[in-house]
Amino acid sequence: MAHTTAGTDAATATDSGPATDTDAGTDSVTGGETAARGDDRWSSASQRRLVWWKFRQHKLAMAGLVVTGLVYLIALFADVIAPFGTSTFDAEYTYAPPQRIHVDWGEGLYVHGYTSTVDEETLQLSFEIDETQRIELGLFVKGEEYELFGLIPWDRHLIGPVDPDEPMYLMGGTRTGHDLFSRIVHGTRVSMTIGLVGVAMAFVLGVVLGGVSGYFGGRTDMAIQRLVEFFMSLPSIPLWLGLAAALPPGWGPMQRYFAITTILAVIAWTDLARVVRGRFLSLRNEEFVTAALLDGCSRPRVIFRHMLPSFSSHLIASVTLSIPAMILAETSLSFLGLGLQAPAVSWGVLLQDAQNVRVLSTAPWLMLPGLCVIITVLALNFVGDGLRDAADPYKR
Amino acid sequence: MSHDEPLLAIDGLKTHFFTREGTVRAVDGVSLTVPRGKTVCVVGESGCGKSVTARSVLGLVDEPGRIIDGRIAWQPGAGEPVDLTTLDPKGERMRRIRGGEISMVFQEPMASLSPMYTIGDQLIETIRLHLPLGKEEARDRAVEQLRRVGIPRPEERLDAYSFQLSGGMCQRVMIAIALAADPALLIADEPTTALDVTTQARIIDLLRDLQAETGMSVLFITHDLGVVAEIADEVVVMYLGTVVERGGVDEIFHDPKHPYTNALLGSIPRMGAGAGRRLATIRGNVPHPSDRPAGCPFHPRCDAAIGGVCDVSDPPHIVFGEARSVRCVLHDDGAAVGGDFRVDGERA
Amino acid sequence: MEPQIDRRRLLRAGGALALVAMVPACTSSSGGDNGNGASPDTSAGTASGEAPSLRALVDSGDLPPVAERLPADPAVVEPIEQIGSYGGTWRNGMVGAQSFRLDYAIGYEPLVRWNLAWDEVIPNVAASFEVSDDATQYTFTLREGMRWSDGAPFTADDILFAYDDLVANPDVMPDGLSLFMVDGELATLEKVDDTTVTFTFPGPHGLFLDALANQPINVLTRLPRHYLQKFHRDYSDDADQAAKDAGFSGWVEALQHAIGGAALWSDIELPRLHAWVPTTPISSATRMTFERNPYYWKVDPEGNQLPYLDGVEYSIVQDEEVLLLNTVQGEIDMIDRVVTTTANKPVLAADRETAGYEFFNLIPDKLNTVTILLNLTCKDEVKREIFQNRDFRIGLSHAINRQEIIDAVFARQGEPAQPAPLPESALYDEEFATQYTAYDVDLANQHLDAAGLTETDGDGIRLGPDGTPVSIRVLAPSDQKTELIDALELIKGYWRDVGVELTVQGEGSEHRYEILDASDQEAHVWDGDGGIHPVSTPQYYLPMDGLDNRFAAGWSTWLDTDGSGEGAIEPPDAAKEQLELYRQVQAEADPERRNELMRHVLQIAKEQFYLIGVSTPLPGYGVVKNEFRNMVDETYFAGGFPYPGATYPEQFYLDN
Amino acid sequence: MLTFIARRCLFMVPTLVAISLVAFAIIQLPPGDYLTTMVSRLESEGQSVDQAMLDGLRERYGLGQPLHEQYLKWISGILLHGDFGQSFEYGTSVAGLIGDRLPLSILLTVTTLLATWIMAFPVGLYSAVRQYSAGDYIATTLGFLGLAIPNFMIALGLMYVMHTVFGYSVGGLFSPEFRDAAWSLAKVGDLMAHLWIPMVVLGTAGTAGLIRILRANLLDEVRKPYVMAARARGVPERRLVLKYPLRVAMNPFVSTVGWVLPALISGEVIVASVLNLPTTGPLLLGALQSQDMYLAGSIILVVSVLTVIGTLLSDILLAWLDPRVRLGYR
């Protein structure tokens, strides 16, 4: 999608020009004059720490990091945080609006139940708050059993009704009467990991091919560049459609998940490859590379021990920026009905239900998964941007 | 050269960088003067604040750096000197001074020229910025300038790009640009560092010839004492944002007063000196300006440091004459001062 | 791919019949002269009315007078509400270039058609017809002086061309069309005179008229000889060249293109008998427009030439939400598909006043909301044995909490029911419809125990005879009818409670049909058809060939091939008897006797209890603007009832 | 320069061949073919399909032939006769279908691209020159927001708001009264009044991306020695930014020209569906879903070829803009 190309281009673009930005000459003021020799923390700090110091200055990036961390925590502890499992539903609560949490200082939290009626003519559902129905809530209440991390059996939920059979719809009910909040929490897992796994795959492909292309140059470079060019000139939607539709029959949700991720990675690797290649091209002629070669280091050693670390922070920045692109791609695929499918729960799958006028006009809270996508993508983008700014701590 | 006022007088200049990690006192009370028609060399290790000093003159200090104190008196002709620190760095007066009255040549000639435009474009631009010339006249002058800095076939070279030229050629072009508007002062910030040795020598020769020809002053910044010996009239030795010693080139080379100067000189390989002799090195590294040691900044590396004195109180500024001074407690001794003073006085 | 294609059905018996149009024609041997009691035979003489736009053309001499354009005995259409006025455009819409929508709305002009009550076949293009007592000979009488939309005469030769030169010509259609076959042999066609043709079948074909009336665009009335003969080698030596000039690879391809029906909407030059002719092809990017056919051969009782509406305009949108918004903005005059889903009803209802439209009802010919079809001839022999056990199926049925599904998935509409004829159907059988629908976990367990599945594993899942847990993988459509998967997700829980594991395998249409075609599914889910008209849509009541109805492909193969086909599995006697009975239905010319025979078939289906259902299908609805008149209040939504074509769009008009 | 262009053109050939192969392969990937799609559609309408008719159609469409023969038939038709084949679904020539929609796609793409640039340029410039200012933070946040909201959500939301709040007739590029009108100033105005919505939807992500790129590049360039050198010779501040670093920072803008088409067409698939635009995107989506082989393959091919040409153009533009590229120093 448009974001993918545009988003990561910046990293490539920075390596234009013969005067590479790695030179820490005296020309750039603070960096040049200050970060020279001297046994202070600046010069003795590892590059990783320097990047971190620099990163911390970027307030939005720090905020993004916090949000990202939280979202991944939610993904990790989804079973605990979600009040209900993915299959729990209440037929009375289809399209139920979100409940308000009331606080009673004597007895704690509670919500009111609904009485719902359906208009036989228009099929409009209407929900009346039933003041008499008071559903006590609690923290770390007993609820559905699950296995934490797939290992530890437990039945406590961060928040939930004291009686697990009572309805609690903090973010409203879905089309089928499931609790949207629980679904969003469970969906975090798939949505957040699809980015990670996909990027990991794209990373391997991109780094290997981009590295080979940039390091060896010449014909190898030419061939790989044609390949990259070729992948980029194909509109990605038909690629998705074709590949997604070609998934072998009878695949379960897990296999489908990995297949979709692979498809996303196949499309995403080109950007990374371009970044890596650009870096390699500019580094190839650096003295430390020549020096390492003269020292008798083997080529792979030169690539992996000397060249890769010198721009690993750039890579991390690029990678961070491609995760949100992947998340968006997953939602788009799901929108087209080609991604994951119910009963799998991901934000994209949840959004599939929200893509219609009915939801916009009568159940807008079903758009909440979209908000989650936006917040997460925003956070990840900020992190990536901050990392990119910080990637070269000597620069300023 | 009708009057004795120095062309440029820097007095108590403090340029600090306000970073999130703390204040970096890159230049911390530097005073120096550039007499008319003379070449003043600023020497010191990397990170001692020489470049920042030079840039402060032209108001070229980038964020988060700021000149927080001091005066830079600029007096190109008769009349009141201008304090450059009071000028708006983005204002018109400063713009006219840059390139018009004071020019600067940088360390990396290749990177100092935009690769997107021909060198002619950049040269003519400078000429037209400062001199009231038409396009054709400016072009003629540009060719003249290139010829003057020793570039063969200047008419053709005008249409070349920086990346098509060698480093030495680029530096010549930079010098041509710098001198295009006949400035009164040329600041050369390590102009030869990035060049190979033979090219270095030629550029130095060129600068010397040009100075002789135009009578301009040169503020030459370098860490290379060999270059200093070759072109300097006066020498300023800097350490960690302060001037530790000033003096005529011979005085500095033959009678260094500051232990740091001494040590610097000791680290130069000398012709004829015993081949097997080890070069002296200075103990330790230059500390980061934000971690400036208390007392004399050099004391942790100084062999002659006096415990309880050097690491406690700032060293005194001992003036031996108009152009000769040192910052060291070792010279705060009456006899030593007197003796040296006399010698210097005679020389001045 | 709208989720709700599932409404097709028929008028409640006796309801709203005041509106009936053409007089019931003779189904059997009594072939009336023009089948049109309500109008004078000499209507041509009195046909004074025509659209102002056409009159202008007549006045300018560009068009012959209306009397010359109409046949001697034009079909008279009784308006549903009242005589209309000329003018206006019917604004409609479709998602993508889905030509079958046009087939249904504009293309329905067969020789014979269904009446509005969907209980009788009446004349249409044919002025009358006659059926031999043994249902082997069908004679159709055409209308004299009837013309194609380009003014060329429509005669028996056109039918002969369509049938003998195209359908029955092995060069063009190597396999013919099954519609015209009995026992794999094609009928022969004989031209009696210029307006009379007779089909003779090798054996009885009792449902031939129904089949003709069922098809939205039947081949016999849309292949003009004068236009297509240039592509036919028998008529023109340059046929190949003409075909190539038209962009085809050869003459056969050109003709096949025409037979296929797509040409109707892509070739605007093709003459036709429809009320409106297209002025832009379906390939137009955003909309397709139609204008009136000046030679249309129907009139209203006052002799005014139909249609009333000047034209039709279909906006071609790419997303159904756009169409929905257009509808609630009042920019669609009448629409009955795509946007009129159960889910959208509240949205559409909210804007009824402002946009000025109302709902009309559609009675779907659906079987059920959710029909679970266990594959009784499943390739896994252990499962096959389990699935074939009737107690097993009864147990699963009792385990389903139908009311909860109705509440959660089906907007609380409908009653618990099995896949059986609906109350609206003449063949309704209350016991069949409601047997085993009670939600009773104990009873379910008893039946499952009775099926021999008494052992359970540690998770409480029953073990099959081979000692493995009983699990059923149910194939479900992932790209349409999403409510099916929603319902399955709930059923999964109910079945889990009685110790049967259910997994859902969602697949897109293409792949789903491949799996079904190979009978590789353990079970699948669909809504099913034939709740109203089991006679013409019997495939969910007995093992028959097909895809969505595949619950015992092995049996139907055995029955079709007498046991010799690949994958054939001998069915139980009950199934054999069902097929035997249904063959008699097909050969029977009398509708009453057909129903009688069909009751036997259904009786066996009830006893066998092949399929498990959830609830009665949801009623459909359509949206019609208040000023858009002569639209029925209620009609059927069914594959065999080409709607809205069957409600006489030619007499719709706009009341300004 | 000429050899440069010639060389680039030569490189295009293998890419194009590969693209045509893959374009064809992609549409063959999903199981089934157009006819199974047709059958499933009719089946879902409750219609039964005559097997004999199907066999006839399969024969007619050549769907029974081996793949390589189908490919050769298709590609040779294109190369020798400019014949892209027939669309099964529409029953007309593919060339006509694409010809109807491609101009609008290109119009939309080009206007979106221009709008993106017009938006991104000043904002990116400001953001870089005033790094870490309030304006920079606002621009950054808005830009990232543009990147973060899925296109289809913007489209659907915008459409709904236009409908409910402004009572605006959604969908399409013309108001009803202009649909059949001949081209006139008023019609162009009407087009523009409709065009901005898809432009906004399609352009937000791209704008955000470009702002980021421009900002990052400009920040890099501004710190380069030649900027300091120019400042030191008295070049005025404004000219300093506009003349020197901006020229270099422009490069990625120019490079995007080539890739913009496939990205926008992909984005457009969803957006144009939602907004009901008669462009190639929805046509492609529909063709892929119904496996209308020649139509889908031809669109992919045409778009890819345009992309390759776009890339060529952007390379030429880049060479014209950047002497280092032109003179082969990079």
Image (cartoon, coloured by chain):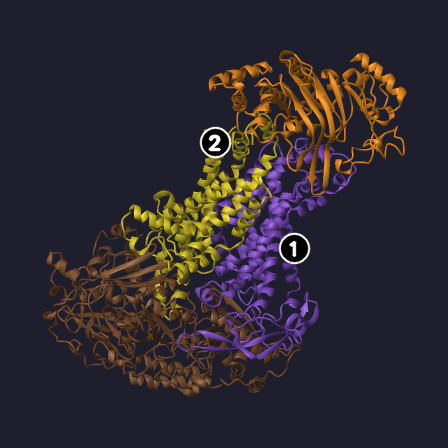
Asked where in the image residue C43 lies, by quadrant, the reply is bottom left
Disc marking residue A66: 1
| A323 in relation to C551, above or below | above
Q: What's the residue type where badge 1 is placed?
A: Val
* Residue type at tag 2: Trp
Q: Residues within 10 Å of mark 1 (few under 14, many from 20)?
A: some
Image location (x, y in percent) of residue B189: 67, 25
Task: Tell me the SS state at disc 1.
Answer: helix
The Cα atoms of the two marked residues, 1 and 2, are separated by 45 Å
Chain C: colour as depicted: brown
Asked if residue D155 is positioned above or below residue C591 in the image, the reply reads above
As displayed, is residue A26 above or below residue B140? Answer: below
The residue singled out by tag 2 in the image is: D320
Instruction: Give me the chain that's purple.
Output: A
- Residue C341, horizontal then vertical, whole percent: 41, 70
Front-lying residue, D49 or B195: B195
Label 2: few (<14), some or many (≥20) within 10 Å? some
Q: Position of residue C263 (x, y in %)?
A: 29, 59
Q: Which quarter of the figure is the C terminus of chain C placed in?
A: bottom left
Q: Which chain is orange?
A: B
Which chain does the yellow colour mark?
D
Nearer the observer, A204 or C339 = C339
Q: Chain of mark 1?
A: A
Q: Residue at x 30, y 53 (%)?
A: D178
Q: Nearer the viewer, residue A195 or C578?
A: A195
Circles 1 and 2 on the same subunit: no
**Residue C123: % across, % down:** 22, 74
